[in-house]
Image (tube, rainbow, N blue to C red):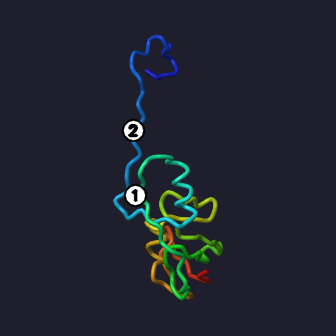
Amino acid sequence: MSRAFVREKDVDYLEVLPERPISEHPNDVTETGLTQIEHALAAASATARVVSEPTDRSEVRFGTAVTIIRDDGREQTFRIVGEDEADPSQGSISHVSPLAKAMFGKRVGDVVRAGAGEAKILQIQ
C-alpha cells in the first residue's frame, strides 16, 4: 500500500535514510571544495586531500577547466573537481566521471569519448 494512504498513527516504524556511500576513489578536492566540506562537516573528520591547482595547462589535469565541442556542435566548459564539489549544472564535473577520465592527459585538439558521442578539446585553462 502506498504511504500516501496510511494514517500517521498507523505507522509503527521510523524511516531511517541510508548512509551516503563512501566512494572507492581518492577524495581529491580543490581548495574551494575543501572549504565547502569543512563547513558541511563541522566537527567530523574528513578524508579529503587538497590537490593544488596545476601550473602546467598543456594537458588536462585535476583542477583544470576544459572547453570541448561535442558532435552536435554544443560547446561546453567544465572544471574537473572532487566528487563532493561537482555540479555539472554549474560547470564542474567529478574527476571520476567518465568524461573527466576520458580527458585526463589529453591536449588541445584531442578527441575524447563524451557520452554516446565524441568531443574535441578546444581549450585548457
Answer left or right for 36 relative to 46. Answer: right
**Which residue is pictured at 48% across the width and 22% down the height?**
3
Quadrant of the image occupied by residue 14: top left
Closer to the chain start, of discs 2 and 1, is 2
Label 2: which secondary element: loop
Name above or below for residue 77 compared with residue 82.
below
Say which quadrant the N terminus sits in: top left
**Which residue is pictured at 52% across the width and 53% down the height?**
38
Residue 95, label in figure: none
Q: Which residue is mark 1?
A: 47
Q: Are marks 2 and 1 in contact (CB under 8 Å)?
A: no
Quadrant of the image occupied by residue 76: bottom right
| Residue at mark 2 to residue at mark 1: CA–CA distance | 20 Å
Q: Which residue is mark 2?
A: 18
Name above or below for residue 81 compared with residue 59.
above
- Counting from the top left corner in percent of width and height, residue 121 is at 57, 82
Residue type at numbered disc 2: Pro
Dot 2 surroundings within 10 Å: few (below 14), some, or many (20 or more)? Answer: few
Query: Farthest residue in the top direction?
Result: 9
19 or 114: nearer the viewer? 19
Residue type at numbered disc 1: Thr
Say which quadrant the C terminus sits in: bottom right
Between circles 2 and 1, the one closer to the viewer is 1
